[in-house]
Amino acid sequence: MTEQIASSVGQGGKDVDHLLFSFHGVPEAQCSKTDTTESVCLRTPDCCARMRRENRNCYRAQCFETARLLAKQLGLKDSHWSIGFQSRLTLRGTIQWIRPYTDEAIEDLARKGVKRLAVVAPSFTA
């Protein structure tokens, strides 16, 4: 996957301003159920900042870890990549989905002046 991404964005992301890793979203409840300690998952803003025992089964934490590892292999600076979650479905806002949302991340990056944005979807295989 690293080779495939690098062929489009260049080594170190030299051919783009920013790389957004976009994963499929799931309801927050699916993630919080995996934290048997009930003390980490979605309880702190940085709950997925690193993999640990409490979040090892959390889909969101696994996505963040996947993005971190890919970014490292690609030689991307921390400021040149981010994560988003897409495909959220909800009935009148009753179900909260994991964040950040891909569509909002793209808008935010555009407001910050990012012109050459690459979006990679590591969890979509087709």
Image: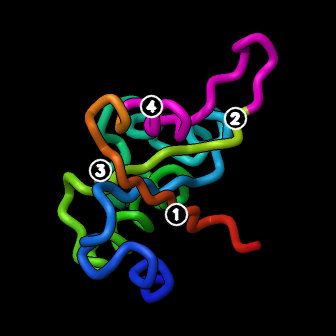
- Residue type at the position of mark 4: Glu
Q: Residue at x 32, y 32 (%)?
A: 45
Q: Which quadrant does the C terminus fall into?
A: bottom right
**Residue wearing tag 2:** 88
Query: Alpha carbon of mark 1 to alpha carbon of mark 4: how far?
Result: 16 Å
Instruction: Give percent across and percent down for residue 89.
Output: 76, 31
* Label located before the other in sequence (1 or 4): 4
Mark 1 residue crowding within 10 angstroms, few (<14) / some (14–19) / many (20+): some
Q: Helix or strand or loop: what does disc 1 sit on?
A: strand
Q: Nearer the viewer, mark 1 or mark 4?
A: 4
In magenta stretch: residue 104: yes
Identity of the amino acid at label 1? Val
Q: Position of residue 13 (x, y in %)?
A: 29, 70
Q: Are marks 3 and 1 in contact (CB under 8 Å)?
A: no
| Residue identifier under label 4 | 107
Disc 3 packing (10 Å; few <14; some 14–19; many ≥20): few
Looking at the image, is 74 positioned above or below residue 100? below
Which residue does the image show at 70% across and 41% down from the upper left?
Answer: 87
Task: Tell me what residue is drawn at x 58 percent, y 62 percent.
Answer: 121
**Mark 1 sits on what residue?**
120
Using a 10 Å C-alpha cutoff, classify the residue at mark 4 as few (fewer than 14 neighbours), some (14 to 19) or many (20 or more): few
Of mark 3 and mark 1, the one earlier in the sequence is 3
Spatial separation of the CA atoms under disc 3 and disc 4: 23 Å
Magenta range is: 89-108
C-alpha distance separating marks 2 and 4: 17 Å
The residue that disc 3 covers is: 49
Disc on the earlier residue, 2 or 4: 2
Contact (Cβ within 8 Å) of mark 1 with mark 2? no
The disc label shown at residue 2, or none = none
Give the mark nearer the N terminus: 1 vs 2.
2
Placement of 67 over or under 91, stated as above or below: below
Q: Give the alpha-carbon distance from disc 2 to disc 3, as whole Å.
A: 22 Å
